[in-house]
Image (spheres, rainbow, N blue to C red):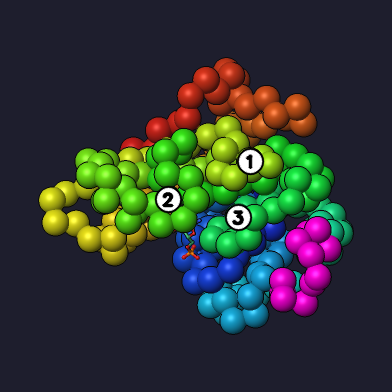
Amino acid sequence: MSEPLRLAVLISGSGSNLQAIIDAIEAGELDARIDTVVSNNADAYGLERAHRHGLPTRVFDHREFESREQYDDQLRRYLETVAPDYIVLAGFMRILTPGFINAFEHRILNIHPSLLPAYKGLHTHRRALENGETRHGVSIHLVTAELDDGPILMQASYPIDAGDSEADLQARGHRLEHRMYPELLRRLAERKLTIDSEGQILHDNARLEKPLVYAG
Ligand code: GRF
């Protein structure tokens, strides 16, 4: 038996992805432990979700820091004491500094609502609709210093139907996210997916050449 995967989950808002991860752990589907939930926003609803499940939380309010570097430095020092296997960004609405990212190189995961490398940044659903795309999706990737640019681990795509609104796409994407993040973490927990200290990614002992496709 291997040890449970130790996670630090970083949020800024609703925390529905956090909830999905908690639910998967509590259902015995994911052999992981959330050692801390961190938010930059004391009002994040996700903190309430964490409390409800007895998880430790910590707020680092970015408005109390003079610079991004100082903020990330505090966050880094705290997370070094927690020493998680992975830092799971789940709607954490802050761009992290290279100093922070280097400190946890190849150990920071993010979920992004688009088929990366398309639609990095914000408002991905709106932009996809404006461009007349016929498909959109969700990506989980490793975080590097470039925004939404690290190696993509897993993707899921869904069709855009005529008449879909931004909210329709958001809802469709969210439903996928809630199944996909626990699934990706499950593969890490089972060591089916491994990421070594050099950033080499193996899936079923073979180098991951292209993102895993999550079919739901
Ligand atoms: C998700 O849509 C995710 O793709 C993006 O932020 C959103 C977080 O939602 N990075 P929630 O806080 O997990 O509900």
Q: Main secondary structure of the magenta part?
A: helix
Mark 3 and mark 1 lie on one chain; the one further toward the N terminus is: 3
Q: Residue visible at 28% across and 60% down?
A: 166
| Residue 176 image offset from top left, x and y in percent | 37, 51
Q: Residue visible at 45% across and 31% down?
A: 212
> What amino acid is found at the position of numbered circle 3 in the picture?
Leu
Instruction: Report if residue 33 is visible in the image.
Output: no
Whether residue 21 sits left or right of residue 177 in the image: it is: right
Instruction: Specify whether tag 2 is near ligand 1 (CB below 8 Å).
Output: yes
Q: Tell me the mark number nearer the camera, choosing from 3 and 2.
A: 2
| Residue 36 image offset from top left, x and y in percent | 71, 65
Q: Please state the extent of the stretch shown in magenta in the rendering.
A: 61-72
Q: Secondary structure at mark 3?
A: strand
- Contact check, label 3 and label 2, Cβ < 8 Å: no
Image mark for residue 89: 3
Q: Tell me the mark number nearer the camera, choosing from 3 and 1.
A: 1
Which of 155/52 is in front?
155
Whether residue 122 sits left or right of residue 39 in the image: it is: left
Quick check: 188 above or below 113?
Answer: above
Residue occupied by mark 2: 113
Position of the C terminus by quadrant: top left
Position of the N terminus by quadrant: top right
Residue occupied by mark 1: 146
Q: CA distance from mark 2 to mark 1?
A: 17 Å
Q: CA distance from mark 3 to mark 2?
A: 13 Å
> What amino acid is found at the position of numbered circle 1 in the picture?
Glu
Q: Residue visible at 40% across and 33% down?
A: 213
Instruction: Specify whether tag 3 is near ligand 1 (CB below 8 Å).
Output: yes
Circle 3 Cα neighbour tier, 10 Å, few/some/many (<14 / 14–19 / ≥20)? many
Mark 2 and mark 1 lie on one chain; the one further toward the N terminus is: 2
| Displayed quadrant of residue 185 | top right
Instruction: Report if residue 11 is visible in the image.
Output: yes
